[in-house]
């Protein structure tokens, strides 16, 4: 298991990280603790180049109001919150108090805890606590894959025109090329990718960052 974009050799990945995505001390410590303390789940953590991209992209977008579905140990949320700036707010939805306790410690170390609100519970229910009107600048989906269609339908109407939804793991380590896959998550992602492609509410592109990232801008 490694934290890197799909298809990159170890050497090329190291070069990429060294030239624009080198983790700072807090990020490096969080990645190391996740790998050591949670070896069975560590692959759920985003890659270092993805963390750098989320900060850069959120800042470039000028986002102030953001949502994350699927927080794990908090690296993606920390990265997004850094891009929001001190006047931005990020609402995170997750089901695990255990994993997000790790996240809270690192958010404090990074100085972004005051920008993040964590809401625990199934996101299919907790997303309904958001205001209904289009108000979100940015959303990041990186949770249970079978829930992606429901999370998408909850978030798209709440995105402002020009707001962006980023969706992780849309390549499933190449599994999307196998329509006969017996994995429920992979089957869902195959159908989800087709759904996004034909959703005329958004303009979407898919990029080969980490395990595939879809960026969809609300029309």
Image: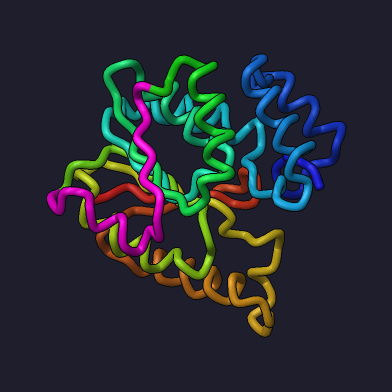
Tell me the magenta residue range. 114-133
Magenta stretch holds residue 121: yes
Residue 150: x %, y % from top left: 36, 67
The x, y position of residue 169, in whole percent, is 59, 55
Q: Quadrant of residue 199?
A: bottom left
**Picture residue at 64% right of the left edge, 16% below the top:** 24
- Please tell me whether residue 20 is drawn above or below residue 125 in the rendered image: above
- On screen, residue 73 above or below 114: below
**Is 54 inside the magenta-drawn segment?**
no
User: Residue drawn 37% across and 30% down?
Assistant: 116
Residue beneath the point at 53% across and 31% down:
53
Q: Position of residue 82 (x, y in %)?
A: 44, 21
Between 92 and 149, the residue placed more toward the observer is: 92
Q: Is residue 215 visible?
A: no
Residue 127: % across, % down:
30, 55
Q: Is residue 116 visible?
A: yes
User: In the displayed structure, would residue 105 be above or below residue 144?
Assistant: above
Residue visible at 39% across and 42% down? 92
Q: Work out whether residue 145 or residue 100 is closer to the camera in this orientation and state it.
A: 100
Callout count: 0
Between residue 54 and residue 79, name the one nearer to us: 79
């Amino acid at each position: 298991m490694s934290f890197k974009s799909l298809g990159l050799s170890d050497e090329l990945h190291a070069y990429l990280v060294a030239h624009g995505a080198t983790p700072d001390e807090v990020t490096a410590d969080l990645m190391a603790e996740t790998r050591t303390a949670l070896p069975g789940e560590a692959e759920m953590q985003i890659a270092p180049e993805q963390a750098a991209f989320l900060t850069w992209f959120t800042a470039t977008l000028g986002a102030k109001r953001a949502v994350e579905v699927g927080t794990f140990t908090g690296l993606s949320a920390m990265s997004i919150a850094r891009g929001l700036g001190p006047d931005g707010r990020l609402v995170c939805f997750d089901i695990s108090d255990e994993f997000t306790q790790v996240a809270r410690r690192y958010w404090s170390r990074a100085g972004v805890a005051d920008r993040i609100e964590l809401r625990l519970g199934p996101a299919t229910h907790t997303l309904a606590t958001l205001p209904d009107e289009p108000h979100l600048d940015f959303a990041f989906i990186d949770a249970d894959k079978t829930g992606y269609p429901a999370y998408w339908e909850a978030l798209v109407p709440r995105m402002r025109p020009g707001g962006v939804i980023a969706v992780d793991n849309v390549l499933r380590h190449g599994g999307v090329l196998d329509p006969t896959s017996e994995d429920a998550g992979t089957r869902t992602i195959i159908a989800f990718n087709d759904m996004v492609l034909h959703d005329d509410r958004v303009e979407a592109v898919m990029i080969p960052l980490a395990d595939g990232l879809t960026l969809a801008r609300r029309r």
